[in-house]
Image (tube, coloured by chain):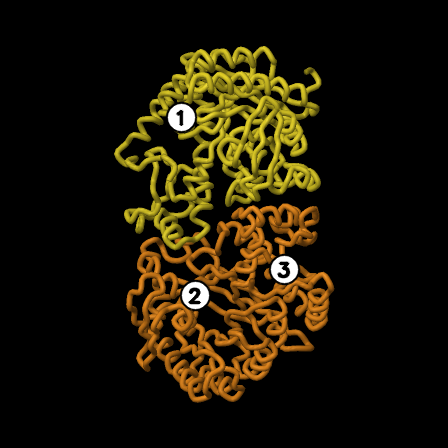
Chain colours: A yellow, B orange
Amino acid sequence: MSEDLFKFSVNARDRDCAARCGTFTTAHGAFQTPAFMPVGTAATVKGLEIDQVHATGSRILLANTYHLAVRPGEDTVAELGGLHQFMGWNGPILTDSGGFQLFSLAQMTKVSEEGAVFRSHVDGRQLRWMPEDAVRIQETLGSDIAMVLDHVVALPNEPAVIRDAMERTVRWARRCGDARTRHDQALFAIVQGGLDPQMRVECAQRLAELDFPGYAVGGLSVGEPPEEMYRTLDVTVPAMPEDKPRYLMGVGRPEDLLEAISRGIDMFDCVMPTRNGRNALAFTDEGSLRLRNLKHRLDDRPLDEHCPCAACRRSRGYLRHLFISGEMLGPILLSIHNITYYQRLVADAREAIRRNRFETFRAEKAAGWATPAGEETSQPA
Amino acid sequence: MSEDLFKFSVNARDRDCAARCGTFTTAHGAFQTPAFMPVGTAATVKGLEIDQVHATGSRILLANTYHLAVRPGEDTVAELGGLHQFMGWNGPILTDSGGFQLFSLAQMTKVSEEGAVFRSHVDGRQLRWMPEDAVRIQETLGSDIAMVLDHVVALPNEPAVIRDAMERTVRWARRCGDARTRHDQALFAIVQGGLDPQMRVECAQRLAELDFPGYAVGGLSVGEPPEEMYRTLDVTVPAMPEDKPRYLMGVGRPEDLLEAISRGIDMFDCVMPTRNGRNALAFTDEGSLRLRNLKHRLDDRPLDEHCPCAACRRSRGYLRHLFISGEMLGPILLSIHNITYYQRLVADAREAIRRNRFETFRAEKAAGWATPAGEETSQPA
């Protein structure tokens, strides 16, 4: 793979845990890890103009292949210059494979060894995706990092069902790797296996043999208690290649990011900053704030006096007013703030790792989130 | 009024029509006329972060006193630092008086000589506004330009009803002027009188005697044919003081702005750029584009290759995708584009006036808007 136009290197490792800093370089520039990717499902981070996304400190975005394939269609995106040109983002982009959406959003999905047949949630059109289609569509979109098609099953589930899906995920990963043609696009494999340590380790080891340029942990943060997720990471991450980036898909709360970084995870994506922001919930170092609360009415303080974002140039009272009045700017400003919060969190995490104080940093953050002011939940509203 | 902290001067007059360029200076800076004010009803231009508003070229904004008084309340705005601090806009702000909303949006409005009694459209609370209240509330908000409370009636209407409202508007204007206490806020009077030339002229003359620092034409663009509005301006504007700014309230389409500028109007506000933008309609020199149309699907051109706005860094195909997918960014980008379009239009109008070629400029613009590509209506969707 010497001709590949991407590479990953680890630059620093914390002495006291598995946390590490790295650099992933793509044809559209590099990003530092641990990295958080805002979700731009339909080639837009909801409510944010692309310059505003950049101003949050984000340096890599995620877009959803399923959504883009269904609407406007990957060929339309390609005709309009590819995903970067289409959405005006010149930095790295990761696309997922659609695996998660086929089993959560699409209708009447049926899986065979060959692939999945399903109906679009937009217009009911029947579509058929083989692993090779997931690769072809992502290559057409032109993302910098693509994901293999995985077989996702609901949890909890029968061990036999989880094993079957895990083994199919490995076979599909191989087919995806074989189908790949673009050397400016890194294809990451996905470790499945539910909450079963043995199956997770087996999946990770079998995928490692296939030598992908990156590995993800999928199928977590689907409703299980956080401790279950952490325990699964405890066994799964050590079975993943040391010299490849490790991506925990769809996670999560700020505390989940730090727990996972401590266990050696390098990349994250989650809708929580934007979805919670649209629902008037702001992340801060003292826990979450619900901006619709009456107590913010006359509060002239910013959400966070150290935050450089556009929302923090306004008062909490103004932000409350926007939500109470149903103004679009409320969701916009809180999305900006929350993404900025996540980016500052991973930037501070990188700095803490370089100084060999990540565990101290994590404990300090956890203490702040648990202060009395943080009585408000950070769960999605 | 020598202590007043604002002033208006005319810098250029077109030789061939009544169009003129001026500068209005306030305690929050100056703006050039002819000027277009985007509408920030609830202390936010819908969907735009304040830096985005500035980037459109806007240098003065309008906010609606009725809306802000009803929610969050003028005292809340004052406690949070006043309107400028509240919404983060350090330039000039004009507030209307609520007169129009009392007769369009509020419920069960009853007018007596003393003032208006009505119920809030938000919570049904009964409120009582005298002309003095409109001044007090606007002084509490802290805008740079305030408007007198006027008595607005529906058109068409009985001549006696229109005369009664016009005469009450003059009496209320005098009461507003007497109630004024802030010398950093310019109070503009409003000419009413329906479509009756004699009543308009009489109203303008009687208000001129009261020596306000600015004069508005109210009660137009409420459904009458554009020609009726132009005819009313033909007789009304010459009766308004030459040395004071003239503001045509709530108008209008790009062609209405140029027609009114030609007749000597200096200031405008209208929701059309933002409301139409939210409804997928974009203004261009070749007429309006409806971005939901299938024909834009694969169009890689910007809305306007000469426009510097954020929307014009994307393709028409991408903008269409955003609207078809119900993404917030569609309304945001088209609002940005349309306000930018209006600001470029008035900036070009100012330049044309300075060169004594405004009528040529207006004819060129009108010809562009009438081209075959402009088959799509520019009426609000």
Query: Mark 1, residues whose alpha carbon is within 10 Å: few (<14), some, or many (≥20)?
Result: some
* Callout 3 secondary element: strand
Distance of label 3 from label 1 (alpha carbons): 46 Å
Distance of label 1 from label 2 (alpha carbons): 47 Å
Q: Which residue is mark 2?
A: B95
Whether residue B278 is visible here, answered yes or no, is yes
What kind of residue is marked 2? Thr
> Do discs 3 and 1 share a chain?
no
Q: Nearer the viewer, mark 2 or mark 3?
A: 3
Q: How many marks?
A: 3
Q: Is residue B179 above or below residue A343?
A: below
> Do discs 2 and 3 share a chain?
yes
Which x, y percent locates residue A191? 51, 19
Q: Nearer the viewer, mark 1 or mark 2?
A: 1
Q: Which residue is mark 3?
A: B283
Distance of label 2 from label 3 (alpha carbons): 26 Å
Q: Which residue is mark 1?
A: A256
- Provide the chain ID for the residue under circle 2: B
Q: Is residue B175 above or below residue B320?
A: below
